[in-house]
Image (cartoon, grey):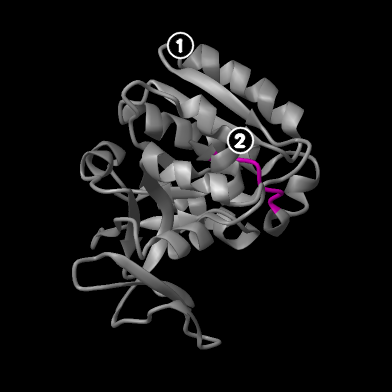
Amino acid sequence: MIFAAGKGTRLKPLTDVIPKALVPVDDVPLIQRVMQKIVDSGATRVVVNIHHHARQLENYLSLLQMKFPTVEILISDESGNLLDTGGGIKHARELFSDVPPTPVLIHNCDILSNVNLADFYASHQGDATLLVSQRETQRYLCFDDDMRLVGWTNIATGEVKGTKTDNLYAFSGIHIMSQQLMQRMDAYPDIFPIMDFYLHECATADIRGCLKTDLRLLDVGKTDTLEKATEFLCKK
């Protein structure tokens, strides 16, 4: 699943006229770059949620369907109400259905990285796997010595959810969730953030961090990082 429903407020004024997913990096829209990476990893079905300038994105996804004819591209329409990251997954669950159910790779549309998604997907065990790194940020996930998620902290404000440990890592916006874990979303409202779900469920579910020590990642979510994106793509 590609998260592409966000309003992209940090990318204004670009996103006043186009959805964030269609913002170009080196003349290629973000959604196409992420889609290419996911398709190259072996995916045969990709779900994309839409909200902001929904019809523009829907039309572009029709073009991508022709570019990637071996992949089924499905739309989870949130044009009536933006559901946040957790609610977006809950709303799209029926589009993931497989027999037997397979884990779902989830990727933000505004993330560029050097991650080998096929290798990351193959590493998945348990209920959820969160790709993390040691990059500097204000908000960190907390893990025990077995890399099981136990909490979250904002080091700037001192806020802690769950348990704070010495194993602090930054979340990448790329994760894998089992469809069995998704069933627990029935108890949640229509709108909720995915990280709150993970933090609430981690006491009884096997939610682990996968540490990538050589991660190169760029969040193309605001105009200053957008300017760095072409240079980022040129680096190996």
Compute the Cα span from label 1 to label 2: 19 Å
Please tell me which residue lies in front, 159 or 23.
Answer: 159
Is residue 149 among the parts visible in the rendering?
yes
The image's mark for residue 107 is none
Image: 28 above or below 74: below
Q: Is residue 6 magenta?
A: yes
Amino acid residing under circle 1: Pro
Kindly identify the residue that appears in the image at 49 percent across and 77 percent down: 138
Position of residue 223 measured from the top left corner of the image (x, y, whole percent): 64, 58
Asked whether residue 132 is drawn in magenta, I would say no
- Residue 213 placement: quadrant: bottom left
Q: What is the magenta range?
A: 3-8
Q: Residues within 10 Å of mark 1 (few under 14, many from 20)?
A: few
Amino acid marked by disc 2: Asn
Foreground: disc 1 or disc 2: 2
Residue occupying the point 33% across, 31% down = 102
Residue count near mark 2 (Cα–Cα under 10 Å), binned few <14, some 14–19, many ≥20: many
Label 1 element class? loop
Q: Report x, y in % for residue 196.
A: 52, 62
Q: Which image quarter: residue 51? A: top right
Left-right relation of 189 to 67: right
User: Along the horizontal axis of the image, is 137 left or right of 118?
Assistant: right
Q: Position of residue 71 (x, y in %)?
A: 43, 17
Q: Nearer the viewer, residue 22 or 80?
A: 80
Q: Earlier in the sequence, mark 1 or mark 2?
A: 2
Which residue in the protein does label 2 denote? 49
Circle 2 SS class: strand
Name the residue carrying label 1: 69
Which residue is painted at 22% across and 41% down in the image? Answer: 119
Task: Please provide percent x and percent y for residue 129.
Answer: 32, 51
Dominant SS of magenta comes to: loop
